[in-house]
Image (cartoon, grey):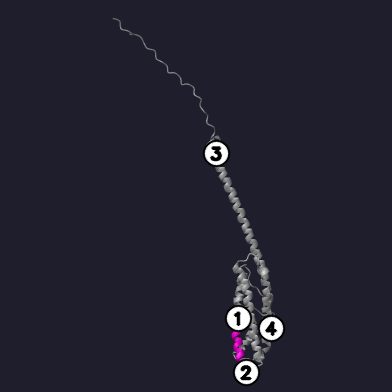
């Protein structure tokens, strides 16, 4: 009996080649849509940041320029005020170190001699009359000084305005009290000794109060000037001035 297939070899089947499939070529990284979108977004954010930074810088520069202009305006106003005060106070006294102002030093010295019994009212009556006239004149000049237009819309704070107004008011009040004290001494020269002593004592008390009030105004004046970087610089009176004796 014959064996089927004996000696036959089976042929091997060759696998088919894969079907050609189109392969999509990826564009370069910078040309890819998501990358472009992200880049555009970041660029937009950077542009916005640059615009905001520039705008803030411009606003800061404008604010600094405006502040500098206000400072210059305030300084000019206070220098004008300083010049007016200098002209009024120079004939009646001079600044004293470290702070303060010597008002009518010749009269003050004579009043101290009177209080100590080292002089008679008749000896200082002339000095007292001159001091009374000088103090009253300076007080009137301070009171007549127009400050509303000088200070209005110049960028001053409320405190700055108060320093200026209070300095003028208090110095004027102090000078009026000095004038009263000097007139009291001049009247004492026409009275008997007993009545003269009472007037001299009263004049001393009034002069002490006058100095306190005036120095309050002087301190406010200094505060007003130093707020703008200005320091009082009143020239001492000459030998012939009423304040120097």
CA–CA distance in space, label 2 to label 1: 26 Å
Q: Residues within 10 Å of mark 4 (few under 14, many from 20)?
A: some
- Badge 1: few (under 14), some or many (20 or more) residues near its Cα, within 10 Å? many
Q: Identify the residue position indicated by label 3 in the image.
A: 37
Q: CA distance from mark 3 to mark 4?
A: 88 Å
Classify mark 3: helix, strand or loop: helix
Please provide percent x and percent y for residue 45: 56, 45
Task: Read off the residue under disc 4.
Answer: 133
Of the image marks 2 and 1, the number of the one nearer the N terminus = 2
Let me know if residue 51 appears in the view: yes
Q: Which of the labelled discs sits on residue 211, or is there none?
A: 1
* Mark found first going from the N terminus, 3 or 1: 3
Q: CA distance from mark 1 to mark 4?
A: 17 Å
Would you say the magenta stretch is mainly helix, strand or loop? helix
Q: Pointer 2: what residue?
A: 193
**Earlier sequence position, callout 3 versus callout 4:** 3
């Amino acid at each position: 009996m014959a064996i089927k297939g004996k000696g036959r070899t089976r042929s091997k089947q060759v696998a088919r080649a894969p079907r050609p499939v189109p392969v999509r070529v990826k564009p370069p990284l910078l040309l890819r849509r998501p990358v472009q979108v992200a880049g555009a977004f970041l660029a937009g954010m950077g542009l916005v940041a640059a615009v905001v930074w520039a705008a803030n810088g411009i606003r800061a520069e404008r604010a600094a320029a405006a502040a500098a202009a206000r400072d210059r305006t305030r300084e000019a106003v206070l220098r004008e005020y300083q010049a007016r005060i200098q002209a009024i106070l120079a004939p009646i006294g001079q600044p004293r170190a470290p702070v303060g102002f010597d008002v009518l030093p010749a009269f003050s010295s004579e009043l101290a001699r009177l209080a100590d019994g080292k002089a008679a009212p008749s000896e200082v009556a002339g000095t007292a009359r001159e001091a009374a006239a000088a103090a009253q004149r300076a007080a009137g000049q301070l009171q007549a000084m127009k400050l509303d237009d000088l200070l209005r819309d110049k960028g001053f704070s409320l405190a700055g305005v108060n320093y200026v107004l209070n300095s003028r008011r208090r110095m004027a009040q102090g000078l009026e009290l000095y004038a009263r004290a000097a007139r009291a001494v001049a009247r004492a020269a026409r009275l008997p000794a007993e009545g003269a002593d009472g007037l001299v004592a009263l004049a001393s008390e009034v002069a002490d109060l006058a100095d306190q009030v005036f120095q309050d105004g002087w301190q406010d004046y200094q505060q007003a000037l130093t707020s703008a970087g200005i320091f009082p610089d009143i020239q001492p009176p000459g030998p012939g001035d009423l304040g120097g004796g």
